[in-house]
Amino acid sequence: MLEDKIKILTAKGESHQILPQLYDYICLTSERKLYYNAAYASHPQVLNKIAYFKQAKLFDGKPIALASAQIRAFYDENIKNTQESSQFQRDISDLFKLAADENASDVHINVRKNECVIKIRRIGDLDVDYEYTALHGHKLCKTIFMTMCDQAGKTFQPKSRQDARMKAVFLPDGITGVRIGTSPTDAGYIMVCRLLRKSDPSQLDLAVLGYETFQIDQINQAKSKKGGINFFAGPTGAGKSTTMSIIVSKIIQESNGSKHVITAENPVEFEIGGEIELHKQINGEMVTKKIMAYATQTPIMANNSKRKKEIFGEAITAMMRLDPDVIMIGEIRDGGSLKAAIDASMTGHQVWTSVHATSAIGIIKRLITVSGDGDSELAKELICDSNIVSSLIAQRLVKKICHHCSYFLEQNHKKLDQRLNDKLNDKLIKRLVDALGHDLSGVRLRNENGCSYCRRGNSGRTVIAEIINTDQKFMSLILRSNFEAETYWLEELHGMPMMAHGLLKVKHGWIDPYDLEDELEFIHLPKALDREYFYQLLNE
């Protein structure tokens, strides 16, 4: 990194400016240092510039060899610290800093015919933060895509779908990346910017995410198997990648770095690692040192979606030659990636991945659908093998209510009357009684006005999940009927559906019952549920 007072003399507008296409090759600074790209040491233009700067006595000592990315970073930092940074770039940096400071997950820039609306997603909700003219919004989007992203120089095409990634130099503190996608709409186009956050060590725990002790035991059981694929399901933004990252981090930590974890991701979202102990003998004494061991994370990149599918399957297959113990695949996209994951599992590798499905039991149906993609059709019997598909996990995120300003349902009748202003809400209370019994102590409702500790009564989000550790009877039943398989899971495997997990959190005052119904459906418990086990969990 350059100090603020140091200038890049070869940058645009400076005394010895060079063509932008040479920014990766050579860099002359005001502190009389000359950097060049070691990979292009014999390039004619590099040799000519070095000779010219040497003859003009513009640098001291010898030219310093650096990698292309390091030289390019000097120019990026120079842009950020000088007037060459446009007002639009500064406005955009301020926008993303605001989003990062408020723990937002996404920024939406919707450019329509006559106006531009900018929304920021906080705690799962989109809020309108800014309104501009359509022209101003278009200039913002063009600035982001053309000057602040890695593929700067490509043409910004509002009428086409495009993907980009923001340069590291423009990222606010605490953010490891901003993933950008654009798409045309009926009235213009939209740019959605996903903020990827640095991992907080204090949050790298399944219990902190919201998993119950019995669910963590189920995940540990899946982790203990030598092979098998563990599938996560849930909507976009449900935290699947976060949960998988925590699990494989724990595998690294618990094995003290003896397991080689490899990932295939598009893009790499989190730095995955675990703290391990290194034992060394120094001067005859055994010294223990704690260090971080990291997963081998591989980004999957391609220029078009068709090629991306091919590369994903190829990347998973190539992992087999890298001596893995555990593999994490960002998402099963098609029959090719599913086949590669199954091959990895059948050769004794533990696999963690995700797929788009609405429930744990729905994962199997989704896999059967995906398996028919292209030439990679897989037999149902192969997918429905408990030795191959080890566990099915579905999760969603529900808002947590603030304990500073929320109120107990049973003790605040005046406030309760304000919420029960129609028959639908009366029916909600009846549904709660049917599920939890007449004792609704502990159930809290959100104070929608909020307080200084929260945002409109919300204090973040928590996981609700359901987990099926498969056995062969379950898999045999699912070949015949989802209903029979689900009944077996609930009755004989003591399965706990996502709704039941949500109700545990409602009873313990973590989430508002209105929010649970908003995320799932009307509160109810399946008839086959083991009620005795459920009530035991309620009272813990």
Image (cartoon, rainbow, N blue to C red):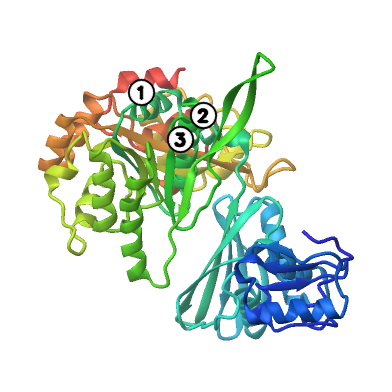
Residue 292 coordinates in the image, percent (x, y): 59, 34
Q: Which residue is mark 3?
A: 247
Drawn side of residue 490 relative to residue 21, left or right: left
Q: Residue at x 48, y 32 (%)?
A: 252
Res. 534 mark: 1
Q: Which element is circle 1 on? A: helix
The image shows residue 312, relative to residue 140, as above or below, that is above
Drawn side of residue 390 relative to residue 510, left or right: left
Q: Quadrant of residue 14?
A: bottom right
Indicate which label's residue lies in the foreground, 1 or 3: 3
Indicate which label's residue lies in the foreground, 1 or 2: 2
Residue 15 coordinates in the image, percent (x, y): 85, 83
Q: Which element is circle 2 on? A: helix
Q: First in sequence: mark 1 or mark 2?
A: 2
Type of residue at label 2? Answer: Gln
Q: Which element is circle 3 on? A: helix
Drawn side of residue 313 relative to residue 155, left or right: left
Q: Residue at x 48, y 25 (%)?
A: 254
Q: Which residue is mark 2?
A: 253
Q: Residue at x 38, y 45 (%)?
A: 322
Indicate which label's residue lies in the foreground, 2 or 3: 2
Type of residue at label 3? Answer: Ile
358 or 302: nearer the viewer: 302
Q: Quadrant of residue 284?
A: top right
Q: CA distance from mark 2 to mark 3?
A: 10 Å
Q: CA distance from mark 1 to mark 3?
A: 26 Å
Type of residue at label 1? Answer: Phe
- The answer, for residue 279, to whether it is visible in the render is yes
Q: First in sequence: mark 2 or mark 3?
A: 3
